[in-house]
Image (cartoon, rainbow, N blue to C red):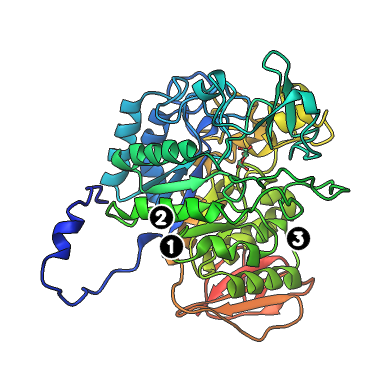
Amino acid sequence: MASVRRLDGARQRAEEPALPAPEREPEWWRDAVFYEVYVRSFADSDGDGIGDLPGITSKLDYLVGLGIDAIWLTPFYPSPGHDHGYDVADYVDVDPLFGTLADFDDLIAAAHERDVRVIVDIVPNHTSSEHEWFKGDRSRYVTRPAENGLPNNWPSNWGGPAWTLDEERGEYYLHLFAPEQPDLDWHNEQVRDDFEEILRFWLDRGVDGFRIDVSHGLVKQKDLRDEPEPFPLLRFSSDWRTAIDQPEVHDVYRDWHRIAGEYDGDRVLVGEVVFSDQTRVAPYLRPDELQLAFNFSLVFQDWNAEAIRRSIDESLAALPIVTWVFENHDVTRIVTRFGPREARAAALLVLALPGPVFVYQGQELGLEEVDLPDEVRQDPVFAQTRGERKGRDGCRVPIPWARTLPERSWLPQPADWSARSVEAQTGDPGSMLELYRRAIELRPGGGFAWRDSAPGVLAFERDELTCVVNFSADAVPVEHVVLASDDVTGVLPPNTAAWVR
Ligand code: GLC
C-alpha cells in the first residue's frame, strides 16, 4: 500500500549523529505506466450519462488488471464546465456532478489499497470566471484599465484577442484560453501563497502528485509587450508565444518541489509544457523543479520511421527523463491519426521506450476519434473558432464498458462501440485490450540502444527485449517473438511491431 504519512521533525533529525545515507529505492514514477482518467467520460455510477468519482472507484480492479501503476484524474473540482473542469471555481472541493470529498477520500483509499497511485490535475494558469477571486476585487488577475484601449496584441490560444473588456468595471482582463478562464497574475505573491495552500490540501488528503495544466504559461511577460506577428494558424504548441515561458515560472516550481518533498512517498509533479523543441522543456526538469514533463514531440509526428526516430533521439538527448505520450484528452486518437493496425504497433513502440508512459483512457480499447455532429459538440474551441477548428470532443466520448451501451452518455457513443467495449474485448487474444495488458505485463526495463535495421524499420534494444517496428511497405524477417501487434510467422508485415528476444 502506498504510504501517505506526512513527514515532520526535519529540525530534530539535523541534531542526530550523521549516519551513512541508506540506499534509496528508485522513485516509483521513473518507469510507471500512468493512465489518464478523463473523469466526465470514464465511468458513470449514477446513470446521468456523465462519469463520476464513485464510477472510477468501481473500475479500479479493471485498472489493476490492465497493470497500470498510477492514474491521473482530470479536474473534478466545482466548475461551470465551460472547458469541462479546466475552469475551476473552487480548488478545494469536488463538483457535485462528480461526487463529494468523501467519494474522493474513498477513491484514494481504494486505489492505495491496490497499490495504484493517484495524481490530480491542478489548473494554476487561470480560474473560472465564477471563482470568488474573480467575482471579488480581481487583485489576483491580470487586468488593465479600459481607458488606454486594448492592452496589447496577444491572441487567445483559441482565437480572438486574449483580452475581454468588462465595461462595468472599466477594465480589460487577460485570458489565454476562453473568456470564462481569466488568467491569474503570478507576479502576485498572494497567488503563490494560495496555490501552496491548495497543494497542501490535496497532499494532506493523500494524492501522490499533480499534473500541472499549462505549466509553462503561468507567469506572463511583465511589461505585456506585443507578440511578434503574424501569428501561426496552428496554435496547439506554444513555440511562437513570447508572452509565456518566463524565467520567474521556475521559482514557482522550486517552491512546489520543496513542498512535495516535505511529504513521503515520492510525490511527483508532472508538467504540461507544450513545446515541440524539447530543449525548451529541459529547464522545467532541473533537479529542484518538476520531476516529469509530458513529451509532446511524439504527438506531433506522422507514422513515419525517420520522423519518429528523430523525435525519440531528440527527446532522449534533451531531457533527463522522457515521459512518453501518444494520446490525451486534447488530441486526435491514434487509431484515426495512424490507422488501426498502426495503432497496435504504436502500443508496442511506446511501451518499450525507457521511462514513464501515459496511456489515455480508451487508447487500450483502440477507440477511434468520433466524428460528432456539430450540434452536439461542446468544446469551447469549436465555438470560439466558429467551427473552423472542430475541437476535442471526438476523443472525449465516454468509453464503452459493456456490449449493451448505456442509454445516456453526454456525448453519443457510436453503436459499433459495443464490439469495442471492455466486456467484448476481455479474454479475446486478438483484441487491443489484451495487447495492452500483455505489453504492460512484459514491459522491458534497462538501457536503451538502437539496433541496425532495414530502411523504414526501427529496432531498439532494452535489457531483455528488442522492439522492432516495421513502418515500411515490405515484410521483414523476425524470430524469437515474445509479443507481436498482429499475426507474425517468421516475418513482420508492414505496420506491425514485435518484441523479440
Ligand atoms: C490544457 C488542458 C486542456 C485545457 C487547457 C486550458 O491544455 O489539457 O484540456 O483546455 O489546458 O486549461
3 or 2: tag closer to the N-terminus? 2
In the image: residue 277, left or right of residue 91? right
Q: Residue at x 35, y 63 (%)?
A: 27
**Quarter assignment of residue 490:** bottom right
Q: Residues within 10 Å of mark 3 (few under 14, many from 20)?
A: few
Q: Which mark is residue 288?
A: 1
2 or 1: tag closer to the N-terminus? 2
Q: Position of residue 436 (x, y in %)?
A: 51, 56
Q: Which residue is mark 2?
A: 257
Q: What amino acid is found at the position of numbered circle 3 in the picture?
A: Asp
Of badges 3 and 2, nearer the viewer stands 2
- Mark 3 C-beta to ligand 1 under 8 Å: no
Q: Residues within 10 Å of mark 2 (few under 14, many from 20)?
A: some
- The quarter of the picture showing ligand 1: top right
Instruction: Name, please, the residue furthest toward the top.
Output: 168
One can see residue 431 in this view:
no
Instruction: Name, please, the residue furthest toward the front.
Output: 147
Whole-number angstrom distance, CA of label 3 to CA of label 2? 35 Å
Considering the numbered disc 3 on the image, is that residue within a helix, a strand or a loop? loop
Q: Residue at x 49, y 59 (%)?
A: 292
Q: Which residue is mark 3?
A: 302
Q: Indicate whether 385 appears above or below 251.
A: above
Q: What amino acid is found at the position of numbered circle 1 in the picture?
A: Asp
- Mark 1 C-beta to ligand 1 under 8 Å: no
